[in-house]
Amino acid sequence: MTNKLLISLIAGVVLVLGSSAIAQDAAPMDAEKMLAGSMQAEAAAAASRGEFRQLDQDVQSLKKEVLDLNRDLFLLEEELLFPANSQVAFFISMDVGEYFDLDSVSLKIDGKEVANYLYTEREAGALLRGGVHRVHMANLKTGNHELVAIFTGAGPHTRDYRRGATMNFSKGIGAKYLELEITDRVQKQQPEFVIKEWE
Amino acid sequence: MKIRNIAVGLVFSVFAVTSLASSGLAGRPAPDFALKSSSGENLRLSEYRGDVVMINFWATWCGPCRQEMPLLDELYSRYQRVGFSLLGVNIDDDSRRAMDMISELGVSFPVLFDTRKEVSRLYEVDAMPVTVIVDREGNVRHVHQGYKPGYEQKYLDEIRSLLRE
């Protein structure tokens, strides 16, 4: 009886030892598999990162193409709508501007209102810093035309100020550019509005 | 049969309302404009590029506008710091009435006066109020016509999602 017990005990120990040996064999196998798996995952992630970068570059280049196309279309549209020969452009500029705080400009050509532009603080500031604003562009027939520009804003001592400037000009062949300049007249301590043609 | 007809009618009316809300301007660049504001300065929409902008067209004779404006003002005060701007565009012929209503309601957002109705034509305003939401890129994303209690929750969701973009 004791012999049987002993034999079964030995068999048990042998079985346990055997299974642990198998487990030890299996452990390196699992580690290798996991390592291979993680390497594959890393490679896949790197590939997807590369794809994303490529996609991003594609999107950027597409965006650039769209912008270029937009610019070309804009130029084409301007050329078609405002042929150079009959084109007249009106610009606003400001010099010093101590006696005048610009609010808006209204333009009339041959008695018809063609533009009415409200200037924000930033825009008026940009004019004061030397900026020139194209307030209107039109196509006019050759011949004589009358331009009336009405400037509103705050004059000396921040009083409401409204002044007009008129100019008769002749439109020949070729584009014409007119500048409406707001300057300070120090002697009179008043703003002055001058319309001049660009040569 | 009657119930079925009502259900079909409801479905169609829902489609009509949603198509109305999304028609016209939605998805297009918001037309630029400049108007005189209640503070006396001129404000131009394009100078708000980079902000989520809500443009609310209203009139003094419009009851729902009166209801809606204080709620919009709350949205404005809460989200102004994180890049949200609200421009109220009043379409009355006489801006003095609008000024009275602004002081009566105590709203703090800038109100612009479109007395010549040029901007409302530009935005195809044919109901009162009309609320247009413009994203940071300057594109119209949502257009709401009219106002009913609960719309402010919709505005809130839309503003928050656009601010996150």
Image (tube, grey):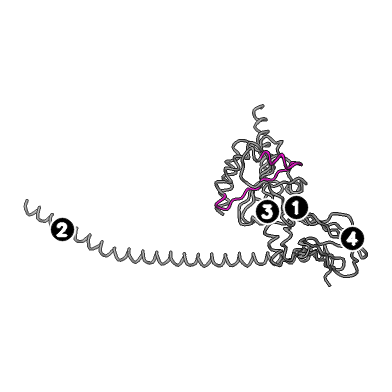
Residue at the top extreme of this rendering:
B2
Whole-percent x, y for residue A6 in the image:
9, 55
**Residue A160 image label:** 1
- Mark 3 to mark 1: distance in Å? 25 Å
Closer to the camera in the image, B152 or B33: B33
- The CA distance from mark 1 to mark 4 is 26 Å
Element class at badge 3: helix
**In the rendered view, would you say B138 is above or below B104?**
below
In the rendered structure, the answer to whether residue B50 lies left or right of residue B59 reads left
Task: Give the residue type that dot 4 points to.
Answer: Glu
Mark 3 is surrounded, within 10 Å at the Cα level, by few (under 14), some (14 to 19) or many (20 or more) other residues, namely some
The reply to whether label 3 and label 1 mark residues of one chain is: no
- Pointer 4 residue: A146
Name the mark nearer the viewer: 2 or 3: 3
What range is drawn magenta here? B80-101
Nearer-N-terminus badge (1/4): 4
For disc 4, the chain is A
- Please tell me the numbered disc located at residue B45: 3
At numbered mark 2, what does the secondary structure look like: helix, strand or loop?
Answer: helix
Q: Residue B112, can we see it?
A: yes
Asked if badges 4 and 3 are on one and the same chain, I answer: no
Numbered disc in front, either 2 or 4: 4
Q: SS at mark 4?
A: strand
Q: Position of residue A69 (x, y in %)?
A: 71, 65
Q: Which three-letter amino acid code belongs to the residue tagged 1?
A: Asp
Between marks 2 and 1 in the image, the one whose residue lies nearer the viewer: 1
- Labels 4, 3: front one: 4
Q: Residue furthest bottom?
A: A199
Q: Nearer the viewer, residue A14 or B146?
A: B146
